[in-house]
Amino acid sequence: MLKFEDLNNNIQAVIFELDDVLYPQKDYDLQVFYLFANFLEYLEQYPPANDVIEFMSKRYEAHGSKDIFKETSRTFGIDEKYEENFNSLYVNAKLPLKLLLYKEVLAFLQELVVNRKQIYIVTKGNPQKQFNKIKHLEWNGLENYLKVYYVEEFNGKLNACIAKVLEDNQMEAQQVNFVGLAKHEEDVNLIGMGFIPID
């Protein structure tokens, strides 16, 4: 559980991952499916948007986003020309609903700000898509205290991105904690940085 009082006194900053750490990634993905299904129904009058949304949602829960357009296209006979629209929507979607931070994470971020700790986000994936997610998050006024780094700008290497955060802000690894997915714990520990896993 994230608790500010568990941080060591020497910690100056906390680095967060984005997807499934600050907010549930599925909240973004499912809204993209909703927009795509309604776009398709509007243009083609078939298939019914609700059927497409239900199929995409169930497949996503079972298999994630991999090949989701291909499987949806095969199931409903959707023309492959719409894959470009789907991919573009994934990157640039104007979501109907704001993305909400996990409550526990929001409280932790607010504590960091009150106690004048620095906050950084490092995020993997297409930088334009990741920025779009950040733009649609409800930050509750915290957006002015964040600095974002995109892992793809460092050849997709998380270690190199973290090293840049430390260099830019003149910090030692021991002064920073990393909040992220458990699968990245080993990489972060190699840098000598404290790791707080999000399950």
Image (cartoon, rainbow, N blue to C red):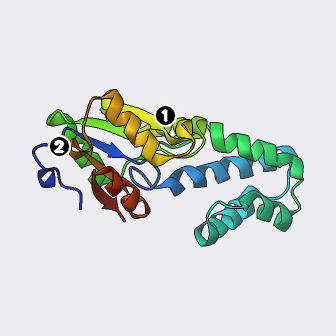
One can see residue 189 in this view: yes
- Could you say whether the residue bearing mark 1 is in a helix, strand or loop? helix
Disc 2 from disc 1: Cα separation = 28 Å
Residue 60 - label = none
Q: Look at 23% across and 56% down and name the residue there.
A: 2
Q: Residue 12: x and y, percent? A: 19, 38
**Where on the picture, by quarter, is residue 119?**
top left
Classify mark 1: residues with Cα within 10 Å, few (<14), some (14-19) or many (20+).
Answer: some
Above-or-below relation of 42 to 24: above
Between residue 50 and residue 114, name the one nearer to us.
114
For marks 2 and 1 on the same chain, the one whose residue lies earlier in the sequence: 2
| Residue 15 image offset from top left, x and y in percent | 33, 43
**Image spot of residue 58 (x, y percent):** 64, 69
> Which residue lies at the image location 16% right of the left edge and 50% below the top edge?
4
Is 63 placed above or below 110 here?
Answer: below
Q: Which residue in the structure is indicated by mark 2?
A: 11
> Which amino acid does the dot numbered 1 rest on?
Lys
115 displayed left or right of 17: left
Find out whether the residues at labels 2 and 1 contact each other: C-beta distance under 8 Å.
no
Query: On the picture, is 60 further left or further right than 80?
Result: left
Is residue 143 at all visible to an observer of this figure?
no
Residue pictured at 37% horizontal, 65% vertical: 199
Q: Is residue 125 left or right of residue 171?
A: right
Q: Quadrant of residue 66?
A: bottom right
Name the residue carrying label 1.
Answer: 135
Q: Please name the residue shown 23% across and 62% down the image.
A: 1
Q: Alpha-carbon neighbours of circle 2 within 10 Å: few (<14), some, or many (≥20)?
A: some
Q: Point out the frontmost of discs 2 and 1.
A: 2
Report the amino acid beneath label 2: Ile
Q: Secondary structure at mark 2?
A: loop
Q: Nearer the viewer, residue 46 or 63?
A: 63
